[in-house]
Amino acid sequence: MIELSNKFTRQIEAEGAAVYPDECCGIIYGRDVVDVGVTRRVVERLEAVVNVFEDGEKYHRFSISAQALMEAERKAGESGMLVLGFYHSHPDHPARPSEYDREHAWPFYSYVIVAIAKGVAGDMTSWLLDENTEQFVKQEIVETAQ
């Protein structure tokens, strides 16, 4: 499961609505907490980043530059956090990964997707890529007050 505060949920929704009809994207920072063999991903910070996918394709694709990812890993390490994953929006499409998303995903990372329908945020889901099957598995989002 991944724990997102109300504030972070609203932030992802707002970013997705703001860049509609293109996809927003960002980096999720936090830590993994293991309680009785169950891992909870606790989100402690979000960072919006520029969608560097080519113009004209950003309405259905996102890309985070290698430089932004390297910088995120550096910041996470310095602050004792991990890069837990990434978030992006799906303009006028459901909050489920596309085949393109699956082909470009990496194991370990959480992929949070918010559906934006005609500029309004809707469903939000999270996914993990199963290393063995190379398919996405839905990850429960627990929204917290903090």
Image (cartoon, rainbow, N blue to C red):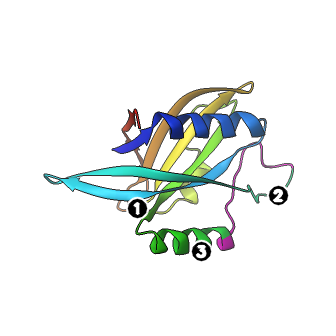
- Crowding around mark 2 (Cα neighbors within 10 Å: few <14, some 14 to 19, many 20+) is few
Residue 70's disc number: 3
From the viewer's side, name the closer residue of 114 and 134.
Answer: 114
Q: Is residue 113 found left or right of 144 in the rendered image? A: right
Q: Foreground mark, 1 or 3?
A: 3
Q: Secondary structure at mark 3?
A: helix
Question: Looking at the picture, does residue 51 appear above or below residue 75?
Answer: above
In primary-sequence order, the first of circles 1 and 2 is: 2
Pointer 2: what residue? 54
Residue at the spot 74% in from the left edge and 27% down from the top edge? 119
Please give the range of residues in magenta.
56-67
Residue at the spot 43% in from the left edge and 41% down from the top edge? 4
Pointer 1: what residue? 108
Report the Cα–Cα distance between label 3 and label 2: 20 Å
Report the Cα–Cα distance between label 1 and label 2: 27 Å
Amino acid type at image mark 1: Phe
The reply to whether residue 96 is visible in this rendering is no
- Crowding around mark 1 (Cα neighbors within 10 Å: few <14, some 14 to 19, many 20+) is few
